[in-house]
Amino acid sequence: MKKSLLLMMLLAGGMSAAYAQDTIPDARRIQETVNYLASDKLKGRGTAEKGSRTASRYVARQFKKLRLKPANGGSYFQDFTFDRNAHKNIPSRNVAAFLDNGAARTIIIGAHYDHLGTAGLFDGKYPIGQIHNGADDNASGVAGLLELARHYVKNAGKEPFNFLFIAFGGEELGLQGSKYYTAHPLMPLDKVHFMLNMDMIGRYNPERGIGIGGYGSAQEWPEVFKDVQQPGIKYFTDAAGKGASDHHNFYISKVPVLFFHTGGHDDYHKPTDDAPKLQAASEAGILQLGIQLINKAMAFPELHYVGEK
């Protein structure tokens, strides 16, 4: 009897440890996600190109595996079109999933999944016909999005906020996905606690650290950031809520924001931004830092938006 009880306790402990491990951002999963999204098979995930649609379906499948609810009625997709220069009615889509905790307010976590593709829509700005795989920009952010979704689905607690996870389309062509979303939100924007955007988080430089924008977008951010540390990860803050990524459209819609970005590099918007250059272990640490900030922000029932001065 005692041996049976001991065995049950050991098995339960092992299962508990494995369960806890499954909620922690994992470098192996991050690398696997980036390897797929930044593979030549997807040809750079260019907006209106086949690879972009394939990427959007991949994200939707991952959301479904996590048993997240489709955020747009019965669909994970929010389709839209836009114009750019001589190009009219360019098709794209956002991919959105909802974690319903029965709360009054919702935290949005986002990352754009598109990249330059074969550069056909950029009017010669980039080499047309060459595949731009966009491992850091922004397969890394999508990997982060999926890891944070996994964490908040699988952790033991029930948070006091809902979560909306969005992979945006059309970012490289003028922040089109977030522009469309904020004009056609799937829930009232005044019920959004804050929006966290991840764009290029896979090339951590320990001398620079990771930049976190939006520090000035809510009165409570200084208190949230107080004493937050993550071993092996250095960070600095930037007050700006506006910027050249999808958080911009939320900020100008009066939503507090945070923006994670590990900085530029020589492969930015070049065909050489490939998966083997990703620093997956550092990205996992960055995501753990993000979890700390999200959890501390949930201690405040509301964040008070601060506009530009």
Image (cartoon, rainbow, N blue to C red):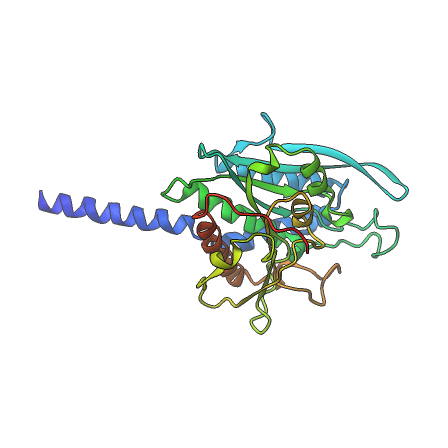
In the rendered image, is residue 283 in sight? yes
Relative depth, front residue between 304 and 65: 304
In the rendered image, is residue 60 in sight? no
Q: Residue at x 88, y 44 (%)?
A: 85
Q: Residue at x 38, y 51 (%)?
A: 21
84 to 243, vertically: above or below: above
Q: Where residue 107 sits in the image (x, y, percent)?
A: 53, 42
Find the residue positioned furthest to the front. 309
Relative depth, front residue between 208 and 40: 208
Relative depth, front residue between 177 and 144: 177
Relative depth, front residue between 154 and 249: 249
Find the residue positioned furthest to the left. 1
Q: Residue at x 65, y 39 (%)?
A: 56
Image quadrant occupied by the N terminus: top left
230 to 256, vertically: above or below: below
Q: Where residue 82 sits in the image (x, y, percent)?
A: 80, 37
Image quadrant occupied by the C terminus: bottom right
Q: Where residue 271 sits in the image (x, y, percent)?
A: 75, 59
Q: Where residue 163 sits in the image (x, y, percent)?
A: 51, 40
Find the residue positioned furthest to the top. 74
Q: Answer left or right for 152 relative to 62.
A: left
Find the residue positioned furthest to the right. 86
Q: Answer left or right for 266 relative to 277.
A: right
Residue 80 found in image quarter: top right
